[in-house]
Image: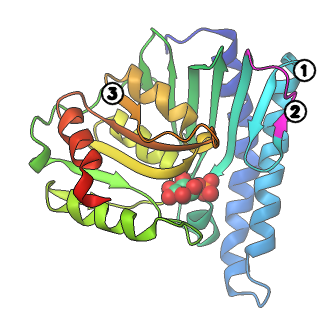
């Protein structure tokens, strides 16, 4: 692999270390599913365990860096220059149900821009990495977005809405509208992997409303470095960590954005 910044090396090592305990924890899920207690609390602790390993590893090198994490929240709040953006298990619901479609996702942000990131599915042993200017890789192989030209032929992936969403109806009508204009829509339950799969051409596009920044931070640079386009729409400055995102190959990006911005689906 031709990625060589100190940050990507740190993230890769931290992910590899955290994945060992995550794989052990995933092995436990099967037993817990049939037990009376169920896997609920166990998953929360697996999330925290994985996050702690990632934080410890990254902090060893840079105790002063800011960190945004799903479980702990924000560390070193005043450092907005250098930040790690961490989701220890993206796809928690899949993990909880013994479905191996989840990943560790870690991005590195400098002056507000994601510079590098890793999305690692430890069960499939698939590590997606990218660094600004140096391309995107799946394990050691260079990846690129698909070359699909027409939106009507595209396989598009999405997620949500969450139970608590106030715009469930809008999200559902958007889903119908997009479905009517593409070949097929998929919902796989891990935004990080959704973006990684667009980056390597398995899917042609991804969109989602109300997604947390830590779910997609690493995906942003991986998808861009794979030749894809990423943009955010209807941003709410009061909730900077909640995003509405579109990511796709460059051919269909404009058409998909137009569809999502149409007034009649509001
Ligand atoms: C989940 C996602 C999933 C998305 C959910 C959620 P978590 O992340 O990646 O695809 O639809 O909104 O945020 O909670 O498993 O880290």
Cα separation between marks 1 and 3: 33 Å
Place residue 143 in its image quadrant.
top left
Of callouts 3 and 2, the N-terminal one: 2
* x, y percent for residue 35: 75, 87
Query: What residue is at 59 percent from the left and 73 percent from the top?
Result: 97
Answer yes or no: is residue 154 visible. Answer: yes
44 with respect to 112 (left or right)? right
Q: Which residue is mark 3?
A: 229
Q: Which mark is residue 56?
A: 2
Badge 1 density bin: few <14, some 14–19, many ≥20, Cα 10 Å? some
Near-viewer residue (155 or 119): 155
Q: Secondary structure at mark 1?
A: loop
Q: Is residue 79 magenta?
A: yes
Q: Which residues are magenta?
A: 74-81
Secondary structure mainly formed by the magenta segment:
loop
Near-viewer residue (173 or 87): 173
Query: What residue is at 9 percent from the left and 40 percent from the top?
Result: 150
Query: What residue is at 74 percent from the left and 74 percent from the top?
Result: 40
Q: Is residue 113 magenta?
A: no
Of callouts 1 and 2, the N-terminal one: 2
Cα separation between marks 1 and 2: 9 Å
Q: Which residue is mark 1?
A: 63
Ligand 1: which quarter?
bottom right
């Amino acid at each position: 692999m031709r990625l060589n910044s100190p940050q990507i090396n740190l993230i890769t090592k931290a992910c590899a270390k955290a994945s060992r305990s995550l794989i052990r924890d995933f092995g436990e899920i099967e037993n817990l599913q049939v037990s009376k207690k169920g896997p609920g609390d166990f998953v929360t602790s697996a999330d925290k365990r994985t996050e702690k390993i990632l934080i410890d590893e990254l902090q060893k090198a840079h105790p002063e860096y800011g960190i945004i994490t799903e479980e702990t929240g924000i560390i070193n709040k005043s450092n907005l220059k250098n930040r790690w953006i961490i989701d220890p298990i993206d796809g928690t619901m899949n993990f909880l149900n013994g479905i191996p479609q989840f990943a560790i996702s870690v991005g590195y942000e400098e002056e507000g821009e994601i510079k590098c990131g890793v999305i690692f599915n430890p069960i499939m042993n698939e590590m997606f990495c990218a660094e600004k200017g140096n391309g995107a890789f799946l394990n050691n192989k260079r990846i690129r977005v698909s070359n699909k030209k027409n939106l009507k032929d595209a396989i598009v992936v999405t997620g949500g809405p969450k139970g608590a969403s106030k715009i469930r109806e809008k999200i559902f009508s958007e889903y119908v509208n997009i479905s009517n204009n593409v070949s097929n829509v998929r919902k796989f339950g891990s935004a990080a992997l959704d973006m990684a799969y667009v980056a390597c051409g398995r899917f042609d596009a991804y969109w989602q409303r109300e997604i947390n920044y830590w779910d997609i931070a690493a995906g942003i640079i991986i998808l861009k470095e794979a030749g894809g386009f990423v943009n955010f729409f209807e941003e709410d400055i009061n909730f900077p960590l909640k995003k509405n995102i579109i990511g796709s190959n460059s051919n269909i990006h404009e058409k998909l954005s137009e569809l999502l911005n149409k007034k009649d689906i509001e």
